[in-house]
Structures are given as C-alpha cells and as structure tokens.
C-alpha cells in the first residue's frame, strides 16, 4: 500500500501484511498449524518469528489478496473454521492497514488429531 500525504508517503510492505494475516490466523480457534506446503518443507506451528509460514499476499495500493495454507484440528467443522479464519484475517488486516481485503483464499492441507499426533501429520506433508 502506498499513500501520499502532505507530510510524505506511507508504504506497507507485503511482509507486514503477511505477518498481520499470520497472527490473525494464530488467534483463530480450530487452527492447529500453518503449513509451509510441500515446496517449503515441514509445516511448523506459528510463533512470533515464523508467522509468515503458510501465508502469501499480493498487496496493491488500496487492496490486498491473501492465500493461507492451514492444518485444522480434528473434530471441528472445517467450513466453520475456514469462514471464521477468513473473517478474522480480513478484519484484522483492514483495521491495521486500511487496505481493502478483496479475498482470503484458504487451502486445508491436513488435519491434526492430537497435539502429539500433529507433528506426525505435519511431517507426512513434508
């Protein structure tokens, strides 16, 4: 995003938007982990230093499109989790950046059965 003001220009980088989207995903109930995808190797749990894992963004001057790759917790309806995730990400990115989020695309890449089994499922996706 680039905004010209009388005092200067404001630019928000793609990495900042990806970090915000990753943090919003972390706060969504039912999300076990973000997946880096097969090409990025082992999927990891979100942490403060790895919040962009599984997040791709395209940021224009006024709009953003966000793609997320996730692993959901077993027993929770996937469509409900994904709808809540889309809403959380859209609202958080819009509130923090002022960008209009045109789409939040989600790819569910796995299901985590239990905490100890989640690592096995994630490793399988490697």
Image: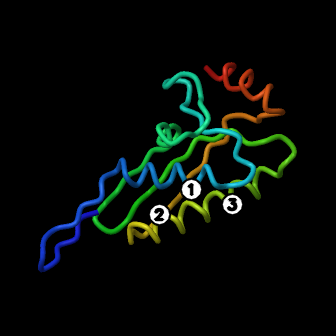
Q: Which residue is drawn at 32% across and 69% down?
A: 62
First-in-chain label (1 vs 3):
1
Label 2 belongs to which residue?
A: 93
Q: Element at badge 1? A: helix
User: How many numbered discs sit on the rendered protein?
Assistant: 3
**How far, Cα to Cα, is label 1 from label 3?**
13 Å
Residue 118 point in image, percent of width and height: 75, 29
- Mark-to-mark CA distance, 3 and 2: 16 Å
Residue at (65, 23) in percent of width and height: 125
Disc on res. 83? 3
Q: Which of marks 1 and 2 is nearer the N terminus?
A: 1
- Furthest residue to the front? 48
Inter-mark Cα distance, 1 to 2: 8 Å
Give the crowd class for mark 3: few <14, some 14-19, many >=20 residues within 10 Å. few
Residue 46 vs 92, above or below: the answer is: above
Looking at the figure, which quarter contains the C terminus? Answer: top right
- Disc number for residue 105: none
* Secondary element at tag 3: helix
Residue positioned 63% across, 41% down in the render: 70
User: Mark 3 or mark 2: which is in front?
Assistant: 2
Q: Which comes sooner in the sequence, label 3 or label 2?
A: 3
1 or 3: mark nearer the eye: 1
Pointer 1 with pointer 2, Cβ within 8 A: yes
Residue 47 image point, x, y percent: 55, 39
Of the numbered discs in the image, which one, if any, rests on residue 24? 1
- Regarding mark 2 in the picture, which secondary structure is present there? helix
């Amino acid at each position: 995003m680039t905004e010209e003001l009388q005092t200067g220009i404001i630019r928000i980088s793609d990495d900042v938007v990806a970090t915000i989207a990753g943090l919003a995903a972390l706060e969504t109930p039912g999300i076990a982990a973000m997946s880096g995808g097969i090409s990025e190797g082992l999927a990891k749990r979100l942490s403060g230093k790895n919040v962009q894992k599984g997040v791709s963004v395209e940021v224009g001057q006024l709009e953003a499109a966000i793609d997320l790759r996730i692993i959901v917790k077993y027993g929770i309806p996937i469509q409900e989790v994904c709808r809540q995730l889309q809403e959380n990400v859209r609202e958080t990115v819009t509130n923090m950046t002022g960008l209009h989020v045109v789409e939040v695309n989600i790819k569910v890449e796995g299901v985590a059965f239990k905490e100890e089994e989640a690592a096995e499922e994630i490793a399988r996706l490697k």
